[in-house]
Amino acid sequence: MSEDRNHPNALERLITDLGPLVVFFAANALRGIFFATAAFMVAILIAVIVSLIRYRRVSFLLLFSAFMVIVLGGLTLYFHQAWIIKIKPTIYYVLVASLLLIGLLSDRNLLKAVLGSVYPGLSDRGWKLLTRNWVIFFFAMAAANEIVWRTTSTDFWAGSKLWGFLPATFLFAIANVPMLMRHGLELGDAKVDPPVPPSQ
């Protein structure tokens, strides 16, 4: 089996990562937050299964995201409380930022372990700066999610994941490229990917 067969291309990754989020947004628009939560749970399970069958592997972050969707989505449906699914991005961002920060402070760069092949040639200094930037960004995104879901409607919050948080994540990834190039990034082979699945 070829290496390409085991690794999704950019379009396939986009579909796998964004599919569940698009399903969530559409289902909320059609039937409301609780139907959307159930649809989100099914969609992210399908994403995991497709990744497993198609590539014989599932990334840890996708599994982690799926776990959180299933657990918090299940609690949302069981208690019929929309706020539970709304705090999922907050919990996710805080957990990932905290893990990256702990790794940074203990000289065990977790971001490099996960994305080493995505940023070829990057120096240790570059990895530290990149990790620091993502830690700040993820804590900021957690705060933003709290503000949005607490001060706006459910429809606005659901939509903001697609047209707000998602573009912000990709734009932030791109904004880091000039700094990475100063620290050894081989741009020709690099992939500008955020270190979390956009479907979070």
Image (spheres, rainbow, N blue to C red):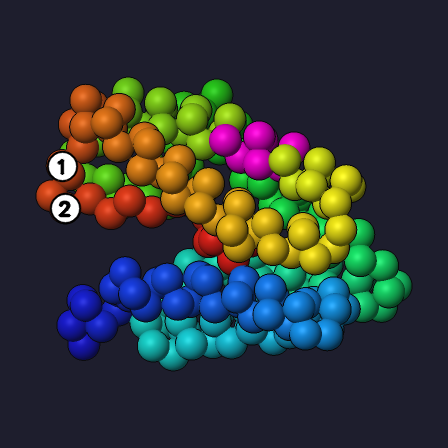
The residues colored magenta run 137-143
Amino acid type assigned to the residue bearing label 2 in the image: Asp
User: Is 21 on the left-hand or right-hand side of 143?
Assistant: left
Residue 33 visible: yes
- The quarter holding residue 56 reads bottom left
Left/right placement of residue 108 relative to residue 127 reads right
Q: Residues within 10 Å of mark 2 (few under 14, many from 20)?
A: few
Q: Disc 1, disc 2: CB below 8 Å?
A: yes
Image coordinates of residue 33 in percent, x first then y, are: 74, 65
| Amino acid at the residue labelled 1 | Glu
Answer left or right for 187 relative to 23.
left
Q: Residue at x 74, y 45 (%)?
A: 152
* Residue 190 at x, y percent in the picture: 20, 44
SS at badge 2: helix
Left or right for 93, reference 29:
left
Please name the residue shown 53% across and 45% down the image: 165
Residue at the spot x=18%, y=76% of the render? 1
Judged by its main secondary structure, the magenta piece is helix
Residue 177 picture quarter: top left
Residue 38 seen from this side: no
Residue 58 % position (x, y): 42, 65
Q: Is disc 1 surrounded by few (<14), some (14 to 19) or many (20+) residues within 10 Å?
A: some
Whether 142 is among the magenta residues is yes
Please name whichever residue, 192 or 51, is drawn nearer the observer in this view of the structure: 192
Residue 81 is labelled as none
Residue at 14% across / 46% down in the picture?
A: 189
Mark number, residue 186: 1
Which circle marks residue 189 in the picture?
A: 2
**CA separation, marks 1 and 2?**
6 Å
Residue 97 horizontal/vertical position (percent): 54, 34
Q: Quadrant of residue 130?
A: top left
Instruction: Tell me if residue 47 is in the magenta stretch.
Output: no
